[in-house]
Amino acid sequence: MRRSATKLPCLSELLATLSKQLYLLGQNYSAADLLCSESFWVVPEMMPDNASIRDWVTRCIERPAALRNLETDAKSATLPSG
């Protein structure tokens, strides 16, 4: 079940910020974006039903470093343990 971005205070703040700027701290990507967007792309069911937040998460995921991390995580998940 997707949550409305206006029903939870933290999501309301996130939406208010992203309605004014591309990233959490302004027009440039930062560690704050990495840390805060990660939960939405690791657990997609947590993604609110809101275009501004989805667009922000997409911008964060499409960054070269984020793509490399996803590839590394995927490889790690398939390695045998031991």
Image (spheres, rainbow, N blue to C red):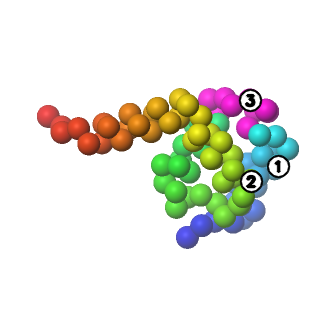
Determine whether 28 is above or below 5 in the image. Answer: above
Q: Residue 60: which quarter of the image? A: top right
- Callout 3 environment at 10 Å: few (<14), some (14 to 19), or many (20+)? few
- Look at the magenta stretch and give its main secondary structure: loop
Q: Which residues are magenta?
A: 23-32
User: Left or right: where does residue 8 sit relative to residue 75?
Assistant: right
- Which residue in the protein does label 2 denote? 52
Marks 1 and 3 sit apart, C-alpha to C-alpha, by 15 Å
Give whichever of discs 1 and 3 has the lower sequence position.
Answer: 1
Marks 1 & 2, CB-CB < 8 Å contact: yes
Q: Spatial distance from mark 3 to mark 2, Cα to Cα?
A: 16 Å
The residue depicted at 79 percent of the width and 32 percent of the height is 27
- Residue 47 magenta: no
Residue tagged by mark 1? 19
Q: Earlier in the sequence, mark 1 or mark 2?
A: 1
Q: Is residue 56 shown left or right of residue 72?
A: right
Query: Is residue 24 covered in magenta?
Result: yes
**In the structure shown, which secondary structural element does the residue marked by tag 2 occupy?**
helix
Q: Amino acid at mark 2?
A: Ser
Identified at 53% across, 49% down, the residue is: 41
Q: Is residue 36 visible?
A: no
Residue beneath disc 3? 28
